[in-house]
Image (spheres, grey):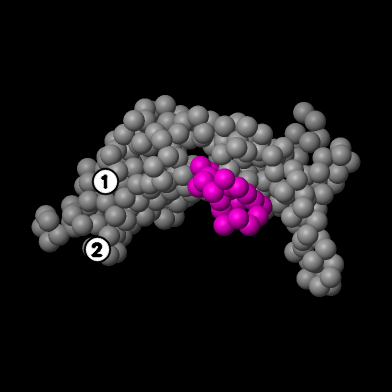
């Protein structure tokens, strides 16, 4: 294993270790990789002792590097992504980009995918800068094909499972319903995440009960099932394992059974 590979493995294990990020930046700079300078500048910009003019110059250089190197860092994924700075999240053609990325210390740290397309998510999984990612948000309400009902969910979760994250948000999978929970549990993703949001996915009490019965449910620090179709039955099942659906208006079905 090379020094670079060892440092990258250490960063995956300790993504908030600034000393490791600093050593990694130094190594990339030695190798002539512009990403090293980018990481070094981001680390330096956290220093409070910087003078205003120094900070401004460093920020301009950091932005310049991002804009220049963005296509190289993303590879085939670039054509689907928004501009990293400005443009209100729109591509030059005025389209809503299929993916919006958040960056931290030269790594992708958060993903908002505005399409549930398997090919798109596969490209994301193959990008080497995704290894420190912590959040994946897939929103299917942008009418970017395919629709959730056209997806092989088993295959879809196999691809999603290959993307690192500890927070998973799935929104507007409205034609899928409780099958979403079935495939989520079958994929064995739940043990590795700390936060789960299934928003407006047409889940019913059956889906809520499946989640409540999972041996891994108590590992979650937060669970959000807003805008589904839970009644008092599903709410009670979740309450037994420590999760509360707090406001009835977010679940139109609550109140139909036993309340």
Tell me which secondary structure the magenta stretch mostly adopts: loop
Residue 207 appears left or right of 107: left
Residue drawn at x 77%, y 49% is 65
Q: CA distance from mark 1 to mark 2?
A: 14 Å
- Furthest toward the right, the residue is 30
* Horizontal arrangement in the rendering, residue 145 relative to residue 80 (left or right): left
Around disc 1, counting alpha carbons within 10 Å, would you say few (fewer than 14), some (14 to 19), or many (20 or more)?
A: many
Q: Magenta span covers which residues? A: 82-104
Q: Looking at the image, do the residues carrying marks 1 and 2 touch, with CB atoms under 8 Å apart? A: no
Quarter holding the C terminus is bottom left
Residue that carries the numbered disc 1 in the rendered image: 202
Is the N terminus in the top left, top right, bottom left or bottom right quadrant?
top right
The residue that disc 2 covers is 249
Tell me residue 132's x, y (percent). Answer: 63, 44
* 251 relative position to 171: left or right: left
SS for callout 2 = helix
33 up-or-down from 152: above or below: below
Pick the front one: 4 or 14:
4
Is residue 133 on the magenta stretch? no
Rendering quarter of residue 151? top left
Q: Earlier in the sequence, mark 1 or mark 2?
A: 1
The residue closer to the viewer here, 119 or 39, is: 119
Q: Is residue 89 magenta?
A: yes
Going 41% across and 55% down the picture, which residue do you hit?
Answer: 222
Res 209 quadrant in image: top left
Question: Element under label 1?
Answer: loop
Examine the rendering and report whether any part of residue 188 can be seen: no
Q: Position of residue 161 (x, y in %)?
A: 49, 34
Residue drawn 35% across and 36% down? 148
Residue 177 is situated, as x and y percent measured from the top left of the image, at 27, 41
Q: Tell me what residue is drawn at x 51 percent, y 42 percent.
A: 98
């Amino acid at each position: 294993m090379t020094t670079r590979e060892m440092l990258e493995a250490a960063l995956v294990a300790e993504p908030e270790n600034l000393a490791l990020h600093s050593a990694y930046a130094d190594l990339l700079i030695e190798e002539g990789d512009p990403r090293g300078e980018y990481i070094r500048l981001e680390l330096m910009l956290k220093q409070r002792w910087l003078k205003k003019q120094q900070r401004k110059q460093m920020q301009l250089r950091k932005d310049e590097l991002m804009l220049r190197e963005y296509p190289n860092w993303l590879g085939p994924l670039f054509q689907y992504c928004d501009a990293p700075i400005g443009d209100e999240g729109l591509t030059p053609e005025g389209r809503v980009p299929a993916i919006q990325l958040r960056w931290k210390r030269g790594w992708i740290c958060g993903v908002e995918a505005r399409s549930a397309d398997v090919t798109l998510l596969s490209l994301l999984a193959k990008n080497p800068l995704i290894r420190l990612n912590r959040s994946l948000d897939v929103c299917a309400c942008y009418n970017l094909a395919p629709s959730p009902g056209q997806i092989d969910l088993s295959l879809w979760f196999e691809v999603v499972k290959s993307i690192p994250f500890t927070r998973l948000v799935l929104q507007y999978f409205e034609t899928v319903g409780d099958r979403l929970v079935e495939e989520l549990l079958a994929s064995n993703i739940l043990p590795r995440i700390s936060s789960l949001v299934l928003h407006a996915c047409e889940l019913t009490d059956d889906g809520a009960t499946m989640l409540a019965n999972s041996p891994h449910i108590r590992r979650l620090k937060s669970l959000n099932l807003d805008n589904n179709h839970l009644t008092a039955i599903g709410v009670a099942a979740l309450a037994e394992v420590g999760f509360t659906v707090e406001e009835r208006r977010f679940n139109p079905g609550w109140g139909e059974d036993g309340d």
